[in-house]
Amino acid sequence: MNVPDDAVLFDMDGVLVDSETYWHRFENDWVYADAISQGSPDHEEITGMNYREIYDYLSAEYGTTLSKEEFVGAYDDHAESVYGENVVLMNGANELFDDIRDAGRKLAIVSSAPQAWIAIVRDRFGLDPLDLVLSADDIDDPGKPEPHIYEHAAAELGLEPEDCVVVEDSVHGIAAAAASGAFTVAYRSTHNAELDLSAADVVVDGPDELRDVLLD
């Protein structure tokens, strides 16, 4: 397995922190119950997408009962407790980050989440220094599952996507990374245990297997 050794780009939600469990609960309790007009979307339809684009998608496919501003505001309000109180960091993440830095590889977080949410996680768990923190809100192009965010990330690091390893957990995120040309690692956990992650170059089960792939 030929794993690039220039840079490692981590998705945040569902990889570095177990936030997807809380977002899925929020979707069940509020988004699908009150914010859409009809239907019962599957979680994977929106997992990995930027929340502004989630609104656009749900509005087009199912209809919405409130404005985009109200929808975004509800997500922002909920994010404070999700990231500030509820989530836990992937086991061994700080040590893994240190070893990636020690190996001379560039290290980045590339996420559909806005910078404010990422900042809570960075500060709470001491993930800095990072070579790049890129949010879908920072680019003008469509977010995941389109490849643009990973193309932008590679360019900002002075690399090609083929020089980068991307760690993702969602179907949309894996599609974005693979389409960019990056070496794509699918991180399997409880929230995505039943999903088809085969579009990735390799699938790992948990932090120990991830470490083996990234540092072997």
Image (cartoon, helix red, strand yellow):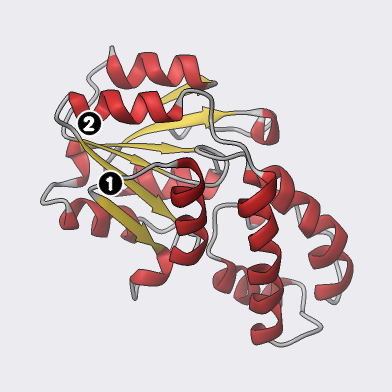
Task: Tell me the residue that label 1 is attached to.
Answer: 130
> In the rendering, at what x and y percent does residue 30 appear?
84, 65
Which quadrant of the view contains residue 28?
Answer: bottom right
Q: Nearer the viewer, residue 102 or 210?
A: 102
**For the residue carrying disc 2, how many other residues have a C-alpha within 10 Å: few (<14), some (14-19), or many (20+)?**
some
Residue 14: in sight, yes or no?
yes
The residues bearing labels 2 and 1 have C-alpha atoms spaced at a distance of 9 Å
Q: Is residue 89 above or below residue 146?
A: above
Q: Position of residue 94 (x, y in %)?
A: 41, 30
- Circle number at residue 101: 2
Classify mark 1: helix, strand or loop: loop
Give the residue displayed 62% in from the left and 28% down from the top: 189
Note whether 152 is above or below 166 in the view shown.
below
- Whether residue 212 sits left or right of residue 6 in the image: it is right
Horizontal and vertical percent position of residue 209: 46, 15
- Asked if 13 appears above or below 30 in the picture, the reply is above
Element type where label 2 sits in the image: helix
The N terminus lies in quadrant: top left
Q: What residue sits 50% from the left and 38% below the top?
A: 16
| Type of amino acid at the residue the image marks with label 1 | Leu
Looking at the image, residue 94 lies above or below residue 119: above
Query: Which quarter of the picture shows residue 216?
Result: top left
Amino acid marked by disc 2: Arg
Q: Earlier in the sequence, mark 2 or mark 1?
A: 2
- Whether the residues at callouts 2 and 1 have beta carbons within 8 Å, the answer is no
Which residue is depicted at the point 34% across and 59% down? 134
